[in-house]
Image (cartoon, rainbow, N blue to C red):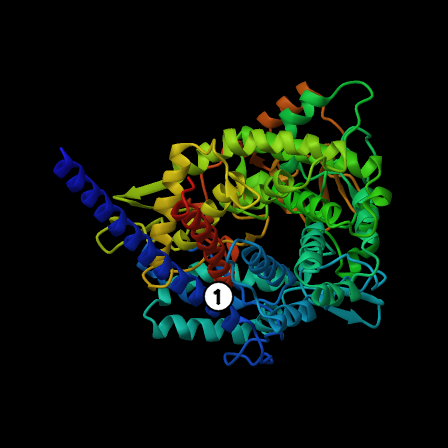
Amino acid sequence: MATMKLLLFVAFSLISSLAATYLNEVITDLNEVISELQSTVLKSQILVPTPFKFAVSFEKQFGVYPSTIKMNLHGDEDHALVRDLAGCFDNNAFVTLWVTEILLEAARQPLGPAPTNNQVLYALQAISSYHDNNRPMSGSILVFWPQTYNKTTGVWSGGPQNLAYLTNDYPKLAAYLQKVLDDLGLSSLWNKLEPVVEGISQSLAALGIPADFDDTFVNIGLGAMLSRFSPSLFQAWSTNNTDFVQAIRALKKYAYRPFNGDLDSGTIDPRTYLFLHDYLNSLNTPGQQGAYVVTWVQNITEDKMYYDFNYKMPFNMNNVDVTVCSNVVYGITAAILADLSGPQEWFDPDVQMIYQNTSDLIAWAISTNFSGRPDLALVYYPSRFNFYWFTSRILNLLTSAPRPLPFDAMDHALASLLDSLRNYATPAIVQSFTFEGDLAYVDDFLGDADHNVFGKLEKRGEDRISSTSMALNALFYTWTENGQLISSTPAEVYKCMFAGSEWLMDNVLTGKYKTYNVVFSGSVKSVSDHPFFYPANIIEYLNGTKVSPNCNTSCISPDLLDAVNGIFNESDYMQQLKEKHFGEATPETFYGYNTPDNQFMPFWSSEPFTYASAMLALTQYRAYFNNLNDGGH
């Protein structure tokens, strides 16, 4: 018996030793991957600005992280090649804001890698140039693109600079693209590309968008993070954001208030209304109030005022994007918990209503799977994994905050988001994982609709690295509190965390897969996303001239306002869904982003965003491994 006990003890010790050795080897490999990802992101930051030179170089701004405007061409091998090769470098605030924020998120994890001070300072220097010049510069309202000043009008307008440079001389651009395609043996593609390129060239003047709440509140979230990360870096941020409450005042002024019938605050994009139709109807009772986050820091009255100055909303109206909603709710939550500018003063009853109503809307969108229309709910963010991750950050902030929370509205948001993320988003994410043995990954849609020369479907998984990273981050943020996985984490979630992280660790740096993502896109991906083909009760030009709904597409022009004001009479709305609008039937079903009419969907991709997201996911995984090694879950 003693001999048997000795043998069992030796066997158990050997197994434990081998397990510990394996675990240490994995952690060592993980450390190396995380370190290399950190270095890759650092090296990608633009430290040598360049001017635009046609066919030679794009204009690149000092301090930004790269992003590229691309098109979701898909089908045969030729389409795949052009999708891969074609792109235009874009300077914008959003990608640099987000990459910086992800780096700070990683730094606050146990043993997390921290960005260098200069890395953050250079990013802050770039971001500071995106404050809306049409408002007092002491404020915190941001624009997406760089702005230029028009001395004649006295108005600043922004747009994609490199794209504008390319299309300023359309004949020259067309000749160049034709030659490139000819050299690649793809001359036949020009017939398909020409109308798209010509359309971009003609419509570029209409891309002078106003400030937006997305960049604005991601920036505020960044400030809140810096206040806990580094006093000196927070001071650098604060220097350019001395009137943070300017953003709060704007939030109240421009919020969507569907039950008041006001032209400016009660009018919305008909695509948004279709997505929200059932939700708003469920709340439509006498005396009902409600206020929700919108995308643009502008209303219809101001759109009319600035229309001729190229500083206006797309399609002259506001919309609701639930990912923008999440970013705003996160920014407010982070600002309150960081005690920015005295939240007892600015988080007043109206802001609390916007915060609570918008949190409920986010939760409803998750629980209904975006009411079957993710293309309309996520109008600027086609990736639902992006949305799940961004939303899970709010939950993680709230669950990890000291108790009691400062405001009842925050307790309400916590309960609402906790239920939707753990009971609805989590199963959706788990079901998205594809298992190959002990490893698993997540695909979205980029590169998954091509056919090879034999006509066989070929899944390239061009967003696989990014989608897997975002899905993992969403799971970690949803099921951790104060840096620890909670004891009630479901077994299938553990399995996805392990298998997904192991796959990511093995593949993120191999070059086997593209590191593309769809960080964001335009609101129109195909014919089915045009707002003019949806029921509306305001159809007129900006000068007030009414337009017949029976008119065909020839009546559509840039100064057309086609929108929904207030709450539609239900029978009228149902009838309009059956009718044609400008000669087209309302698209009531979403068929995905890889359908034939989505061939030229524009999107923005950022490799630093992918690498930073992967680094954050693996940093959280490493923390979990350390807990396991110490006898944790």
Kindly identify the residue that appears in the image at 26 percent across and 51 percent down. 17
Quadrant assignment, res 146: bottom right
Q: Nearer the viewer, residue 416 or 137?
A: 416
Quarter of the picture containing the N terminus is top left
Q: Nearer the viewer, residue 288 or 105?
A: 105
Side of 232 where 606 appears, left or right: left
Helix, strand or loop for disc 1: helix
- Residue 199, position as x, y percentages in the image: 57, 59
Q: Provide the residue designation for mark 1.
A: 38
Q: Nearer the viewer, residue 108 or 460?
A: 108
Quarter of the picture containing the C terminus is top left
The local crowd at label 1, few if under 14, some if 14 to 19, many if 20 or more residues have their Cα within 10 Å, is many
Residue 207 shows up from this direction:
yes
Kindly identify the residue that appears in the image at 67 percent across and 70 percent down. 126
Q: Is 126 above or below relative to 612?
A: below
Kindly identify the residue that appears in the image at 48 percent across and 41 percent down. 475
Side of 485 where 407 appears, left or right: right
Name the amino acid type tagged 1: Gln
- Residue 448, position as x, y percentages in the image: 36, 49
What number of labels is visible?
Answer: 1
Q: Is 417 above or below relative to 73?
A: above
- Residue 576, position as x, y percentages in the image: 63, 26
Q: Is 258 above or below relative to 76?
A: above
Q: Is 155 above or below relative to 394?
A: below
- Residue 308, position as x, y percentages in the image: 79, 59
Kindly identify the residue that appears in the image at 12 percent across and 38 percent down. 3
